[in-house]
Image: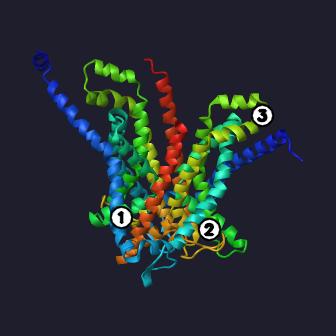
Amino acid sequence: MSKISDSVLQPGCELRRVYDGFWRYAIYLFGAISFIILLLIALFIFREGYPAFQKIGIWQFISGLRWDVSDQAYGILPMIIGSTYVTIGALLISVPLGIFTAVFLTDVAPQMMRSIIRPAIELLVGIPSVVYGLVGMLMLVPIIRQSGHGSGDSVLAASIVLAVMVLPTIVSITEDSIIAVPNAYREGALSLGATRWQMIWHVVLPAAKSGIIASIVLGMGRAIGETMAMIMVIGNSIIIPDSIFSPARTLTGTLALELKYAAGLHWNALFATGVVLFVFILILNSFGFLMLRGKNK
Amino acid sequence: MKISPRVTHSIAWGVCWAAGLLSLAFLLVIIGYVFVNGIGSISWEFLTTNPQGGLKGEGGILSPLVGTLYLVALTLLIAVPLGVGAAIYLSEYAVNNWFTKMVRFGVESLAGIPSIVFGLFGFALFVIALGFNFSILSGSLTLACLCLPVIIRTCEEAIKAVPGTYREASYGLGATKWQTIMHVILPAAIPGIITAIILTVGRIVEETACLYVTMGGSSNMPTSVWSNSRTLSLHLYYLAMETTAVDKALATGVILILIIVVINFVTRWLSNRYVAMTRGGNR
């Protein structure tokens, strides 16, 4: 009976149910789009990179010391070491600075300072990476050059530029995880007679540990992925850097610098480099998100 | 000798202050340096002439500015509908099953992939395989993939913030789920969706690496989405690396920073207004 009255009283009724059903499936498709893109990216770079792994050998490719296009020699170890050095250098600066800044924002700073520094850090996120590269190139590199250590384009310059770029990631995630520590922890520590610093150092920061580790891991992902700013200050020589004043080249820099002119095995080798980056970042970020989720439980 | 906890406390407080001020100093130094050295080169002529190319980097920033506008418009056109659709899925349709887990994994992983890897993908798929060549279209499609996670997350939060009572009232009036979404939930989530769009504009303006390998970098005035072109960020890179026009690069930096400051300001203003609106939402 209800069926009859529906169609009699509300002529549009059935049509809107059809719409509803159609859009349900359309929305499922929209939902899957990110995963589809992820699969496409994996598919394309693996497909183009595979011949390089096949011809050169995965291990020789990763541990090879020479990258020489004219000689068809493709080993990415110098770039892996270059990327590793600048990342470690950046984290050595930005992790302590970021954690103390986060503590400053949550526990130390007066309200006025907070309302200046928070927007300032948000602004740091938004500044284009080429602007960082430019300032590094014009300000930092000449200072290093004048100190008498080569051309100035160096692992040191790249690390400092990168440290500033990673800082907002570390500050904001660390700050969130410090705020998430229950107040009872703080009250407990203070009531036992701890100073506020003892409370932060022995109670709050350990409780926020997984969030802090996550911030470091995600910051690391950002550091490894940075491309243009690195090209601008690191010198791009394909050598294994022997000091912090030595030039170097990053994995991402190689891709940007050579992709447009590559053909044949060179092309495949660049995509194979992309595969290495892709897989590494995927593992790193999964670990980072795992830590963040652990915190929320 | 053991240092007393009070002394440690004072030292630590000093270190925290130093860290906070140093972080602030970074921003001030960067912005100060770019402005002091770049603002002198900005003139009406700089804004309204095309780059002339060459080693001296003569000319202004008109065509990169237009290229940026093209790119922003086209990227938003592609990415926003997809992103809002995915956000609707995650906030309204998702149940805890393998499909949702897959969707979440996709969004999270995509968010962390470096720009240049998107560039690699865009180069192989759009520039070469689909034959779009170096063009604004190739750049937009690549950027749309890169921007999706930001749009999805921001829109998902906006949609989830719509009170459950709105949905119940709509269902109570006999509306279907899709009618509820289109006529009740999305209109209520509009401020959040606009925030997502503005954030994405910021992302497009700051992005360089993936465009460097998909957009071509020509300094000619773009005439259609098939044009080989460059954005302001790319223009800055070319000026800094391939010309001697350091002053022009810095001036371009000033323009970029101004755009980002405006974007940050608008997002902040919008989200404050949004919070005020939902708090006072008893009308």
The residue labelled by disc 1 is: A46
What residue is drawn where x is 42% and y is 61%?
B117
What is the number of the mark on residue A194? 3
Residue A184: % across, % down: 66, 28
Of A111 and B9, nearer the camera is B9
The residue labelled by disc 2 is: A155
| Type of the residue with mark 3 | Ala
Q: Residues within 10 Å of mark 1 (few under 14, many from 20)?
A: some
First-in-chain label (2 vs 3):
2
> Mark 2 and mark 3: span between their CA atoms?
42 Å
What residue is drawn where x is 47% and y is 49%?
B202
Residue A109: % across, % down: 71, 38
Q: Is residue A295 visible?
A: yes
Callout 3: chain? A
| Type of the residue with mark 2 | Val
The answer to whether the residues at label 2 and label 1 have Cβ atoms under 8 Å apart is no
